[in-house]
């Protein structure tokens, strides 16, 4: 296995959510809450949660986007038969996609090297049992990049978005939301925050 592959898991690497929450939640409480902004702040975080119900996507703003325990709780509370998806942009740095489906939680991060400076990224790598990056490591995604393949977005497409240096995290997530079929709802929430 090469170094790049060590950061990627597939569907068989998904976490069992109930056991994971009971072990990790106490350690994750209080990691921080980000302030939502109108897009003019350099410290902008933004997150949405989407779930499919009655044949259509429902989308709402995700709160506490830097608190992994809260993210998992919010996903679990909105999970329907098709599960729930969280799309989270952390400042202008990186994004996280998380999905709750039944008792499984799958997550990916667009750039594992942010674990060196972001508690959320470090906690995510720890939860996924991924190696911690070194200072000189190249930018690369980590986690389960196949988590949206059954919804129409392949791992290759998601990895290509992660590798695009011209796009900011909110733009990358807009592309994900559009591909999955809730791009308009994503854009409306982003514009209103």
Image: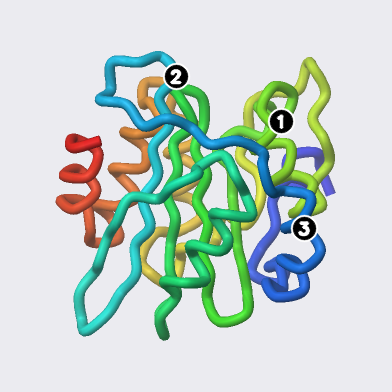
* Quadrant assignment, res 25: bottom right
Classed neighbour count for the residue bearing mark 3: other residues with Cα under 10 Å, few (<14), some (14–19), many (≥20) = some
Element type where label 2 sits in the image: loop
Instruction: Work out how far the residue at label 2 is from the one at label 3, CA to CA, in angstroms.
Output: 26 Å
Expressed as whole percent of the image width and height from the top left, the position of residue 17 reads 67, 72
Task: Identify the residue under disc 3.
Answer: 24
Residue located 63% across and 26% down the image: 139
Q: Say if 153 sits above or below 78 in the image.
A: above
Q: Depth check: give the residue in front, 6 or 174.
A: 174
Task: Identify the residue under disc 1.
Answer: 115
15 relative to 75 in the view: left or right: right
Expressed as whole percent of the image width and height from the top left, the position of residue 170 reads 35, 34
Residue located 82% across and 52% down the image: 129
Task: Identify the residue under disc 2.
Answer: 43
* Proximity of marks 3 and 1: CB atoms separated by less than 8 Å: no
Expressed as whole percent of the image width and height from the top left, the position of residue 191 reads 18, 35
57 relative to 93 in the view: left or right: left
Which labelled disc corresponds to residue 125?
none
The C terminus lies in quadrant: top left
Between discs 2 and 1, the one toward the N terminus: 2
Residue located 74% across and 44% down the image: 125
Instruction: Work out how far the residue at label 3 is from the one at label 1, CA to CA, in angstroms.
Output: 17 Å
């Amino acid at each position: 296995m090469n170094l790049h592959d060590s950061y990627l898991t597939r569907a068989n690497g998904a976490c069992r959510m109930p056991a994971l929450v009971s072990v990790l939640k106490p350690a994750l409480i209080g990691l921080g809450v980000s302030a939502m902004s109108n897009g003019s702040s350099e410290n902008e975080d933004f997150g949405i949660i989407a779930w499919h119900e009655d044949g259509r996507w429902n989308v709402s703003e995700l709160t506490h986007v830097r608190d992994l325990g809260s993210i998992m709780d919010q996903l679990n509370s909105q999970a329907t038969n098709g599960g729930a998806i969280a799309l989270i942009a952390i400042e202008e740095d990186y994004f996280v996609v998380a999905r709750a489906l039944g008792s499984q939680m799958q997550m990916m991060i667009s750039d594992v090297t942010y674990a060196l400076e972001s508690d959320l990224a470090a906690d995510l790598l720890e939860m996924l049992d991924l190696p911690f990056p070194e200072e000189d490591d190249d930018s690369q995604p980590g986690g389960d990049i196949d988590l949206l393949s059954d919804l129409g977005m392949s791992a290759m497409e998601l990895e290509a978005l992660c590798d695009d240096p011209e796009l900011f995290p909110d733009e990358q997530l807009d592309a994900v939301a559009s591909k999955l079929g809730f791009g308009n709802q994503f854009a409306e929430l982003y514009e209103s925050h």
